[in-house]
Image (cartoon, rainbow, N blue to C red):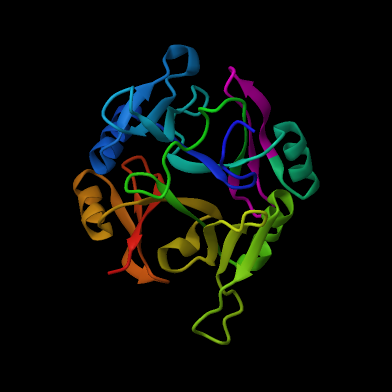
Amino acid sequence: MPTSIPLGAPIWVDANAPDLPTELEFYTRLFGWKTFDSGEEFGHYTEFCLGTSAANARAVAGIAPNQSDQPDRSASWGVSFHVRDCVTAASEAEKLGAAAITNPMRIGDDLVFASMRDPDGGTFGLFEPLNDDMGFMAYGEPGATAWFEYVYDGAPVEAMQFYAELFDWSVVVTGSEDPDDAAPPVELRVRESGIEFGGCRAAVGPEAGLPPQWIVCFAVDSVDRVAASAVGMGGSVLMPPGDDAGMRTATLSSPGGALFGVVSEAA
């Protein structure tokens, strides 16, 4: 297998951008990322990396300009999950109630990818790596992805059954402070390895009007500082900094409207 990232686990995240220069400036200033443009042949898909040069760069995410047929599409982040065979996984996803946004396609000698919409309307990717350099090169450290939260206006355990069947996840109800809570949050783990990588919770407050979606969360040293910095750089705060289950979190938005989270250990 080309990567050590377990099957079924998040393997990559990327965003689209209606105004690529503005989004690039925002994220590089906010997280200190370096950028590496793949060039015109690959639609100027750009990798965000930790490190100071190409020699020590470690990829953490990607971003691409909107396609010409959707120039004004709002910016958004998406997560892709590691699969052994993208064609097989896409077929199985459809049998379970998902819909294909893009059919499996080979991208150079690097990967096979398909974009899907789950039964509740949330989007996700199927990612079959073809070489050792695909997927996260850094994870769980400041500036890298660290958590994936599915926000859903309904019962989390029900929304995650699709993913559990498709990717062989364990969906663990964590309980709630309210004994009458009909939609308690759940933890998500890769069953084979037991690795916990994210959760699903019912939408609250400003999130209630949003469609079901994955929120990609990046680790930072200070959630409060990063949230304040984001506003000063043209972004906004959807969910202000707060503590939950030993983590301090906030949900932010880029200038182009892409929602993402920042997390750190609670003080």
Residue 151 visible to an observer of this rendering: no
Residue 36 at x, y percent in the picture: 36, 23
Q: Is residue 251 left or right of residue 105?
A: left
Secondary structure predominantly adopted by residues drawn in magenta: strand
Residue 216 at x, y percent in the picture: 45, 49
Total marks drawn?
A: 0
Q: Quadrant of the C terminus?
A: bottom left
- Residue 180 drawn above or below residue 220: below
**Residue lying farthest top?**
41
Residue 153 at x, y percent in the picture: 56, 65
Residue 227 visible to an observer of this rendering: yes
- Residue 38 drawn above or below residue 212: above
For residue 72, what is the image quadrant? top left
Magenta stretch: residue 150 in it? no
For residue 137, what is the image quadrant? top left
Q: Quadrant of the N terminus?
A: top right
**Residue lying farthest right?**
95
Q: Residue at x 28, y 47 (%)?
A: 235
Q: Which residues are magenta?
A: 100-123
**Residue lying farthest bottom?**
179
Q: Is residue 266 left or right of residue 137?
A: left
